[in-house]
Image (spheres, helix red, strand yellow):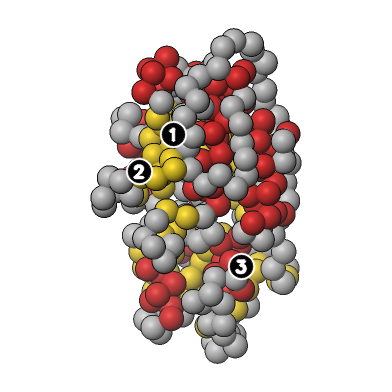
Amino acid sequence: MKKSFTASLAFGAATLLLLTSCAGNADSGATTDPASGATGASDSEFGVTIDENAAALLPKDIQDAGVIIAATAVGYEPYEYKDDNGEFAGLDIDLGNAIGDALGVKVEFQDASYDSITGAVKSGRYDVSLTGYTASVEKQAQTDLIAYAKSELSILVPAGNPLGIDGLSGLCGTRVGVEKGSSADLAIGDYIAAGSCDVPIDFTAFPVQADAVTALQSDRIDAVVVQSVSGNYVANSLERTKDSFDLVTDDAFPATTIAMIVDKAQPDLRDAIVAALLSLQENGTFSKIFEKYGVEAAAVTGAALNPAK
């Protein structure tokens, strides 16, 4: 069934560990530009204070260092991108900084390629990912996933939809772009492997979604398959693109859960992030962050662990 865009709202199971202890380090959250290494103060617009119970769950080495290293793959609006000043911005950046504030530590963001993040978190290079990451059974087998958002997949096409693409089957015989390693990459790869098209899809996986969007703008491809939350933002809200694209939605695409990932060898860090996330939901900060980007319907309640099935 084809339908117009509506961001999906889903509810995850809540996980909350109630412990009492002393507060952790009282530093505010921060971001780090990987090109310069410069660290700036966290955005204070949400006024988040330390949750002592959540902070007490942090591993001692992170409490002592006062820093959580977070991987993010910029170029995926509205989750993460660079603003006009070259600084990290987006929903995941705001959420990560708010989690850091709740835990009394800084969060340093480092840019990473999307398809490398699972292995890099597992190896200890990063403590957590905040990058609009799609939950999957494969990722869940390697790392712990913490759900915080939900989205479907949609198709971004040039304004006016000149090829009349009306859904998944309409991609046959067209040039299609995706972000490498994303849920869109997996979905289109599966569709091609199933032999669903008489005329094959000319399929390109780009390093980041922004590259695929640029290729669509320059007529090098005909469509980009994206998460609906991101596609709606690019088509209707992002200043440089909002008059350039239409969004086609099709129920043939599966819904996806968006999750943070943490190394399975770091259960204390995982539990601290879960507790901080639930605290932000309780005090209203979580909803305010999603509302800031106009995607409040994509937020989930709770912090379901390892939701992929």
> How far apart are labels 2 and 3 at the CA level?
31 Å
Q: Amino acid at mark 1?
A: Lys
User: In the rendered view, does 82 fall on the left or right side of 125?
Assistant: right
Residue for point 31% across, 30% down:
123
> Which residue is the site of mark 2?
39
Q: Is residue 172 visible?
A: no
Label ID, residue 232 = 3
> Which residue is the site of mark 1?
106
Q: Residues within 10 Å of mark 1 (few under 14, many from 20)?
A: many
Q: Quadrant of the N terminus?
A: bottom right
Which numbered disc, 3 or 1, marks the residue closer to the eye? Answer: 1
Q: Determine contact: label 2, label 1, CB under 8 Å.
A: yes
**Sequence-wise first label, 3 or 1:** 1
Q: Amino acid at mark 3?
A: Asn
- Label 2 secondary element: strand
User: In the rendered view, does 290 fall on the left or right side of 177?
Assistant: right
The image position of residue 97, as x and y in percent, is 51, 41
User: In the rendered view, does 113 fall on the left or right side of 298?
Assistant: left
Residue for point 66% across, 36% down:
280
Residue for point 41% across, 26% down:
66
For this rendering, which residue is in front, 117 or 273? 273
**Sequence-wise first label, 2 or 3:** 2
> How far apart are labels 2 and 1 at the CA level?
10 Å
**Sequence-wise first label, 2 or 1:** 2
- Label 1 secondary element: strand
Figure check: 305 above or below 166: above
Label ID, residue 94 = none
For this rendering, which residue is in front, 121 or 84? 84
The image position of residue 152, as x and y in percent, is 63, 57
